[in-house]
Image: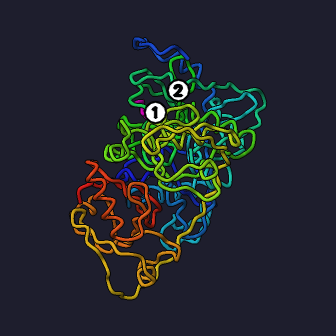
């Protein structure tokens, strides 16, 4: 069971995994309307009857080497990456021994320590047909790393599936089966039309039981559960359990408005907190996976951070909105468009950028090669620039290993009001803090515990590059900028800090 570590180890993928010896084979586990208020339905039976034939069960298996326990993020139905409980290991062991006795197969030690028997990790999930020819949508984590993927239709027909494409960033996968006759198929609806409180219905394969219908409402929209930069989940209280991953979430018109992907749960079972990928985000990704086997997302080439009230005040922005640029990639679209560090992006391609979460989704959904207008806040006023988007490059940046630093003299100057000391860059300090030879700015050499700088997350070894969007090269430069802002009666001053995680803007009081 894969989990999101960032939510106190409680958010888990709603899929089901089991581990069995390869010699035993696969273990079968037991059993768009307008936005207006609607009354509670008398029954979901008609809707379920129409939808069930297009929802499928998905089983994927991966051969494990001796001693391998499967994906660290997907385990045997226990809590995240924790080891299975002893009683569960015993039950699994007894089940395998019973099967071997019945089938006359050679006995093994049931996966206990010392077992050299090849085993298979089996993932059970859900999916749904979007094309009668046999095109199926599911979650990437249901089939990730699989050697073999099998689809079981509502009438128990079993078909081998080919993976057409996967996208781990949005956790989607598209499969292809070859049916004897056209399959019932579902249509995507408009997830943006669904409102909090609207009725929804989910169908999936919880715990390998087969097609199961649950119902509830849209509990919230736009949820960020820290899965990735494109989080915008629909939250529902329709029961979503392990094995529901990849199954559809329906509106009352029978349209798919979400793909069930995760649950928030301390027990692994449904507590009424399920999360679905909105259809309007999934549709474009599914189309690209189906046609090309991969996704080409738009890329602007900026690092961004949230615009707080202090930051907005320091740059004269009327409200805390938009996404602030805290780094620009070399030769990327943003650099070519002459965007600058400290610019606050207010609109992208004529769409409002409400916060830093909005921008990555807008950029990713924009066609590669398109010329887009970008409205920014710079030097106290709006400006509009144009950028030509490129394709999002592959990840692969690796950090160099740290090395011990020699002791050096400390030529620091205290910024008492901020609770830190800074020093001009020197060869000794570059060596001590492992800074590049062309690094500009002043280095933080001390941070007072519980002081203002400490509260704002500044760390020793980080470099202050700019103050109020102007370069600084000495402690005196910093002090002068602070004094000027205080004279202008500004409440806050922006400092641009560079550390191991890149550049970020930090607002501090002007009086220091």
Whether residue 163 is visible: no
Magenta-drawn segment: 234-241
Determine whether the residue tagged by mark 2 lies in a helix, strand or loop.
helix
Circle 1 sits on which residue? 234
Percent of width and height locating residue 439 = 49, 71
Percent of width and height locating residue 230 = 52, 43
Circle 2 residues within 10 Å: few <14, some 14–19, many ≥20: many
Whether residue 330 is visible: yes
Circle 2 sits on which residue? 191
Q: Residue at x 52, y 67 (%)?
A: 109
Q: Which of the 4 quarters of the picture holds residue 298?
A: top right
Between 454 and 312, the one nearer to me in the picture: 312
Determine whether the residue tagged by mark 1 lies in a helix, strand or loop.
strand
The Cα atoms of the two marked residues, 1 and 2, are separated by 9 Å
Left/right placement of residue 259 relative to residue 314 reads right
Percent of width and height locating residue 200 = 46, 24
């Amino acid at each position: 069971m894969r989990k999101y570590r960032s939510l106190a180890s409680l958010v888990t993928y709603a899929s089901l995994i089991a581990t069995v010896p390869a010699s035993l084979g696969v273990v079968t586990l037991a059993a768009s309307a307008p936005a207006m208020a609607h009354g509670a339905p008398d029954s979901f039976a008609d809707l379920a009857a129409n939808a069930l034939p297009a929802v499928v069960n998905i089983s994927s298996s991966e051969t494990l080497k001796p001693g391998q326990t499967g994906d660290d993020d997907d385990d045997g139905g226990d809590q995240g990456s924790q080891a299975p409980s002893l009683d569960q290991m015993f039950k699994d062991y007894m089940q395998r021994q019973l099967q071997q006795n019945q089938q006359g197969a050679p006995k093994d030690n049931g996966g206990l320590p010392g077992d050299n028997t090849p085993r298979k990790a089996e993932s059970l999930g859900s999916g749904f047909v979007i094309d009668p020819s046999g095109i199926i949508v599911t979650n990437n984590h249901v089939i990730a790393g699989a050697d073999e993927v099998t689809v079981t239709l509502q009438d128990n027909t079993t078909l081998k599936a080919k993976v057409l494409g996967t996208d781990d960033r949005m956790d989607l996968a598209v499969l292809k089966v070859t049916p004897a006759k056209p399959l019932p198929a579902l249509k995507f609806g408009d997830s943006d039309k669904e409102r909090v409180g609207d009725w929804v219905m989910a169908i999936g394969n919880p715990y390998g039981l087969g097609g199961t219908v649950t119902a509830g409402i849209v509990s919230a929209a736009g949820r960020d559960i820290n899965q990735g930069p494109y989080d915008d989940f629909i939250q529902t209280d329709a029961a979503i359990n392990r094995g529901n991953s990849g199954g559809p979430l329906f509106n009352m018109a029978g349209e798919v408005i979400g793909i069930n992907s995760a649950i928030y749960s301390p027990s692994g079972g449904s507590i009424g907190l399920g999360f679905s990928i909105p259809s309007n985000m999934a549709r474009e990704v599914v189309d690209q996976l189906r046609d090309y086997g991969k996704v080409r997302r738009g890329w602007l080439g900026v690092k961004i951070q949230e615009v707080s009230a202090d930051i907005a005040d320091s740059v004269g922005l009327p409200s805390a909105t938009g996404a602030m640029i805290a780094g620009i990639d070399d030769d990327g679209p943003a650099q070519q468009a002459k965007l600058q560090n400290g610019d606050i992006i207010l609109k992208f391609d004529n769409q409002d950028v409400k916060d830093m979460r909005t921008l990555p989704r807008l950029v990713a959904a924009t066609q590669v090669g398109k010329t887009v207008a970008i409205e920014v806040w710079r030097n106290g006023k709006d400006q509009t620039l144009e950028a030509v988007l490129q394709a999002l490059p592959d990840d692969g940046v690796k950090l160099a290993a740290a090395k011990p630093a020699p002791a050096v003299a400390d030529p620091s100057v205290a910024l008492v009001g901020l609770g830190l000391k800074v020093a001009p860059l020197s060869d000794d300090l570059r060596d001590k803090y492992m800074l590049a030879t062309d690094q500009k700015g002043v280095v933080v050499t001390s941070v007072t515990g519980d002081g203002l700088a400490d509260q704002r997350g500044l760390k020793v070894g980080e470099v202050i590059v700019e103050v109020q969007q102007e370069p600084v090269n000495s402690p005196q430069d910093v002090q002068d900028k602070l004094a000027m802002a205080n004279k202008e009666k500004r409440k806050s001053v922006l400092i641009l800090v560079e550390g191991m995680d890149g550049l970020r803007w930090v607002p501090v009081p002007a009086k220091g």
